[in-house]
Image (tube, grey):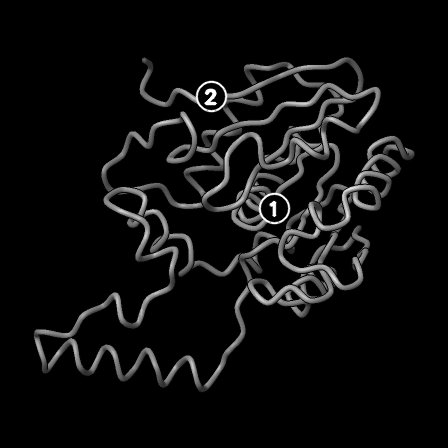
Amino acid sequence: MEKDFINYTKEGIGDDVLFLHGWGGDKNSFKAIYSKLQDISYTAVDLWGFGKSPLSDPNGFSVIDYADKLADFIKSQNYKNLTVVGHSFGGRIAVVLAANYPQLINKLVLTDAAGLKRFKLKVFLKVLRYKTKKRFFKKTDPSKHASADYNAAKGALRATLIKTVKQDLSKFAKKIKCPTLIVWGEKDTETPLWIAKKYKRLIKDSGLVVIKNAGHFCFLEDVNLYTRVLSCFIKGERQ
């Protein structure tokens, strides 16, 4: 198996759409969506470290690493008028990909995407307390202060998570020039709505659709609405 092997499914005829799943997901995460879309050629990947795509670097990947490797993958596929759809963690990667490789992407869709930060005193104090304990009391257990994703991840995947969550993508979002659709769950608590609104401010050519009463997986909570919105955007007038 090649070093950066990526497992993927590519089917259909029509506009090219690449789906990037969230943390802990795989290429089937968007199956309920791409199975309903008509007149598209969809590609669904297992991002490295998930599904059947191995994470080759023991030190983990950064968001930029993922974007660089996906750019190579996209070039190998000879896509035309490509739309990239990213959810949560996949949205982080999509932001960097669109910013650093504008020639490869025609349209971008961010769904409950992570990647932006804002200062919170409560979180700052929590981190400060942990670092103080770690410095002066060697027996501090980091798992007591960590997220479920951190505790579940091991080895290279944990290293990847650490690199990922530390990075704010504001500077990358500002560089995006392609038409961008932002779709968000109104009641998302993992990536709250303020992130969607900030992405809309940062990305010049963008629009926001909020799905009522939906959470972090809004595309699965209202499959029909999400599919209609996505289809209209993909088939709309190109820039």
Residue 145: which numbered mark, if any? none
Q: Indicate whether 79 appears above or below 159.
A: above
Q: Earlier in the sequence, mark 2 or mark 1?
A: 2
Q: Amino acid at mark 2?
A: Asn
**Within the image, what quadrant is residue 64 found in?**
top left
Q: Amino acid at mark 1?
A: His
Q: Is residue 34 left or right of residue 236?
A: left
Near mark 1 (Cα within 10 A), the count class, few <14, some 14-19 or many ≥20, is many
**CB-based contact (under 8 Å), mark 2 and mark 1:** no
Q: Indicate whether 205 appears above or below 84.
A: below
Q: Is residue 155 left or right of residue 124?
A: left
Q: Position of residue 202 (x, y in %)?
A: 69, 60
* Quadrant where the C terminus is found in the figure: top right
Name the foreground residue: 120 vs 201. 120
Name the foreground residue: 20 vs 213. 213
Q: Position of residue 140 (x, y in %)?
A: 15, 74
* Quadrant where the N terminus is found in the figure: top left
Q: Residue at x 79, y 44 (%)?
A: 226
**Within the image, what quadrant is residue 103 found in?**
top right
Q: Position of residue 74 (x, y in %)?
A: 57, 23
Q: Position of residue 222 (x, y in %)?
A: 77, 49
Q: Secondary structure at mark 2?
A: loop
Q: Residue at x 67, y 15 (%)?
A: 11
Q: Which residue is mark 1?
A: 87
Q: Which residue is mark 2?
A: 7
Q: Secondary structure at mark 1?
A: strand
Q: Indicate whether 97 appears above or below 195.
A: above
Q: Indicate whether 41 appears above or below 173.
A: above
- Name of the residue lying farthest toward the right: 237
Between the residue at mark 2 and the residue at mark 1, the CA separation in whole angstroms equals: 18 Å
Near mark 2 (Cα within 10 A), the count class, few <14, some 14-19 or many ≥20, is some
